[in-house]
Image (spheres, helix red, strand yellow):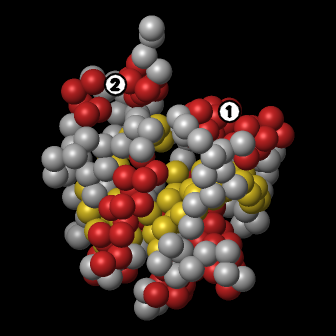
Amino acid sequence: MMAVALQFYSKDRDRAMRLAHWITDIEKSPRSDVMIILVNRFDCAKADEETVRKVSSKFPVMTFTTTTKQYGWPEGCNAMAFDVFRMIEDEVDINVYQPGDPLLLIEPDCVPISRTWLNDLTEEWQLAQAQQKCVMGAWRKSGPECGHINGNAIFDVDITRKLPGLSDAMKAVRGTAWDAALAPYFKGYWYFTGLISNRWNENTLTDEQIETPWIGCRVPVLIHGCKSEDVWKYAQRKLFPPP
């Protein structure tokens, strides 16, 4: 089973609910192979009941409240991601997931732009797994010398046990975004994909930019980071064209 963990706090909660509704609306029929996990920070209200009901009409759904009391960037973001990794590890222990299953971490500034995005990412993950990789996402030459894969990415649900020293490294991260801080640990186990496009902190995107592969030749299916409505408007035109 694939797990999709949508993380949010009070300032982006409304946007997260919008994304949860969108993920549900673009799926044509119910499926049991993807679990949607609505992850609220410890000081933020859970997903509203209407959203949980809507998502559950298409997917198994779970709510999870993080417990590590950190705020701001990067400590608040780091704490949420690490709590999700630890929670998923517990779920593996009770056989909800199997080692090798994909965990997709997303934030409210992500937008799927294809109805087949979940299937496409799952198929690409299988290619990564065939190469013994544990991390799959959009790589950029920034942060540490090796660059890093943006944290809106797919991870093996059992990654904290598969990567030597990762659990201890997570505990030591301070003052740096976790995806950059842990890049040296991920480096030997990562797989670059063009299906996720990292447009972090970009304010505007044209249709051409949205459709430009991050790497390779396949059009992205998930766009992260754009701060305007450009990607939302593109996705709505593409997936729900006017009659």
Name the residue carrying label 2: 204
Q: Which residue is mark 1?
A: 14
Q: Position of residue 15 (x, y in %)?
A: 61, 33
Question: In this figure, what is the number of numbered marks?
Answer: 2
Residue 117, x across and y down, in percent: 42, 46
The one nearer the camera, 69 or 226, is 226
Give the alpha-carbon distance from disc 2 to disc 1, as whole Å: 21 Å
Residues 63 and 144: in front is 63
Residue 145: image tag: none
View extreme (bottom): residue: 164
- Dividing the picture into quadrants, the one containing residue 90 is bottom right
Q: Residue at x 28, y 58 (%)?
A: 193
Choose between 152 and 236: the one closer to the eye: 236
Mark 2 packing: few (<14 Cα in 10 Å), some, or many (20+)? some
Question: Does residue 112 lie above or below 67 as drawn?
Answer: above
Q: Is residue 159 left or right of residue 94?
A: left
Mark 1 secondary-structure assignment = helix
Residue under the point 76% across and 43% down:
52
- Judging depth in this view, the residue of 99 and 196 nearest the camera is 99
Image position of 134 (left or right of 87): left
Where residue 34 appears, x then y in whole percent?
A: 58, 58
Task: Kindly identify the amino acid type of the residue bearing the numbered disc 1.
Answer: Asp
